[in-house]
Amino acid sequence: AQSVTQPDIHITVSEGASLELRCNYSYGATPYLFWYVQSPGQGLQLLLKYFSGDTLVQGIKGFEAEFKRSQSSFNLRKPSVHWSDAAEYFCAVGAHRDDKIIFGKGTRLHILP
Amino acid sequence: DADVTQTPRNRITKTGKRIMLECSQTKGHDRMYWYRQDPGLGLRLIYYSFDVKDINKGEISDGYSVSRQAQAKFSLSLESAIPNQTALYFCATSGSGGDQETQYFGPGTRLLVL
């Protein structure tokens, strides 16, 4: 069955520290992978996506993610977080010409001053 | 102006009432989706539509219905609202071309059923 797992419900980091949010997926086909961010009171905004090619993907707001097929992972990273990065982050998986994508349950990121 | 808009942004209703949530998009996308978000459960797909004549049930369609009035409009109805339908509802769109897998979201409608 297709699934997306985000093992961490909450993560707290200090402002300026590095960040890694984990995402593991189970998908029969070659996956398309996404990270979305939801700021408080807002809709979901696409941070980055992986379809093919270079497994290290750059996104907006200084985020990047690395696709590791052998580990079925697509972890999101940022070298130095800012207070404005406090939000909920969703990993999602789909496939080429598939009719829908599947979302993880989200990781809420808290930033300490 | 936002590409995907939802109305209303907030709604309080009573058990048993019929309500409609509306979604409009100016992206020219063929595909539209309705999700609900509950704390700790992420987003779950309610219904989706690939064009005006195509409507499909998602993971949790019971208690909901939809109408695709035009390419740009996709409405979600709760025929008889119940308290466990209290949630944040999102509309999303995607194209049918090379980037059809990427979904773009509206700002959400927060619904409270008393």
Image (cartoon, rainbow, N blue to C red):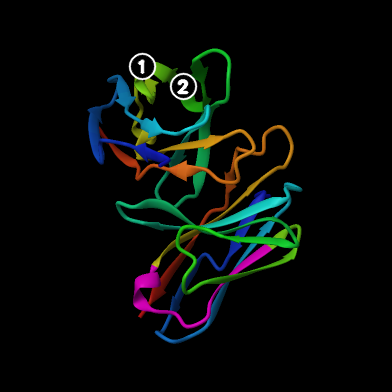
Identify the image quadrant of the N terminus of chain A.
Answer: top left
Residue at which label 1 appears: A79
Counting other residues with Cα less than 10 Å from the Cα at mark 2, is it few (<14), some (14-19), or many (20 or more)? Answer: few
Please name whichever residue, B51 or A18, is drawn nearer the observer in this view of the structure. B51
Residue B101 quadrant: top right
The residue drawn where x is 47% and y is 50% is A42
Note whether B84 is above or below A91 in the view shown.
below
* Magenta stretch: includes residue B83: yes
Viewer-side residue, B105 vs B51: B51
Callout 2 secondary element: helix
Label 2 is placed on what type of residue?
Answer: Gly
Discs 1, 2 touching: Cβ within 8 Å:
yes
**Does the magenta segment cover residue A94?**
no
Residue displayed at 40% across by 71% down? B85
Q: Residue furthest bottom?
A: B16
Residue B91: x percent and y percent? 57, 56
Residue A3 in view here: yes
In the displayed structure, A70 sits above or below A85; it is: above
Per the rendered image, the range of residues in magenta is B74-86
* Amino acid bearing label 1: Pro
| Element type where label 1 sits in the image | loop
Q: Chain of mark 2?
A: A
Q: Which residue is the site of mark 2?
A: A62
Left/right of residue A66 with respect to residue B104 in the rendered view = left
- Residue B54: x and y in percent read 70, 60
Is A94 situated above or below A18?
Answer: below
* Badge 1 density bin: few <14, some 14–19, many ≥20, Cα 10 Å: few
